[in-house]
Amino acid sequence: MNIVPLKSHQVEIHASEYYEWYDKYPFVFESEVEAIRDELPLGDSVGIEIGLATGRFSVALGLKEGVEPVFELRKIALSSWIEVIDAVAEKLPLKEQIKKNVL
């Protein structure tokens, strides 16, 4: 499989703006969190978020681990005490692990 590298330059430049967008529109964030939470097993926060971004959703859902290839977004997520794996979804370094919930 030939994996094309993520062109993350623009995402890195605008990482803080991405994070702050949900501060400006909290009703959007809360409705998205509730929609995701409705699909998770009740009381179950064991899992991983692929495409973690800033970790905002993982924090709200109680997830403790995520995958994010963009450095600036990883930095923000790490400040939220989430374990962040530097990888892309197409090539996850999780072969020996089983995750109950994957977002």
Image (cartoon, grey):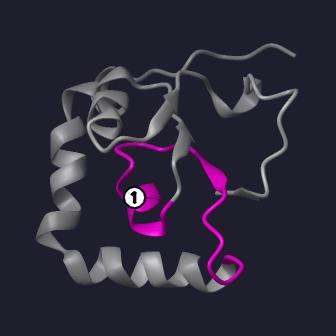
Residue shown at 44% from the left, 76% from the top: 33
* Number of residues whose C-alpha sits closer than 10 Å to that of mark 1, classed few (under 14), some (14–19) or many (20 or more): some
Residue shown at 66% from the left, 58% from the top: 46
Q: Kindly indicate the quadrant of the structure image that contains residue 54.
A: top left
Numbered-mark total: 1
Q: Kindly indicate the quadrant of the structure image that contains residue 50.
A: top right
Residue shown at 30% from the left, 44% from the top: 80
33 relative to 64, above or below? below
**In the image, farthest residue toward the left:** 24
Q: What residue type is disc 1 on?
A: Val
Question: Residue 100: percent from the left, percent from the top?
Answer: 79, 57
Question: Residue 28: percent from the left, percent from the top?
Answer: 31, 79
Please tell me which residue lies in front, 82 or 24.
Answer: 82
Q: Which residues are magenta?
A: 40-62
Q: Is-magenta flag for residue 51?
A: yes
Please tell me which residue lies in front, 5 or 69.
Answer: 69
3 relative to 36, above or below? above
Question: Residue 2: percent from the left, percent from the top?
Answer: 80, 13
Q: Is residue 23 left or right of residue 77?
A: left
55 relative to 62, above or below? above
Residue shown at 35% from the left, 56% from the top: 56
Say what secondary structure mark 1 lies in. Answer: helix
Residue tagged 1:
59
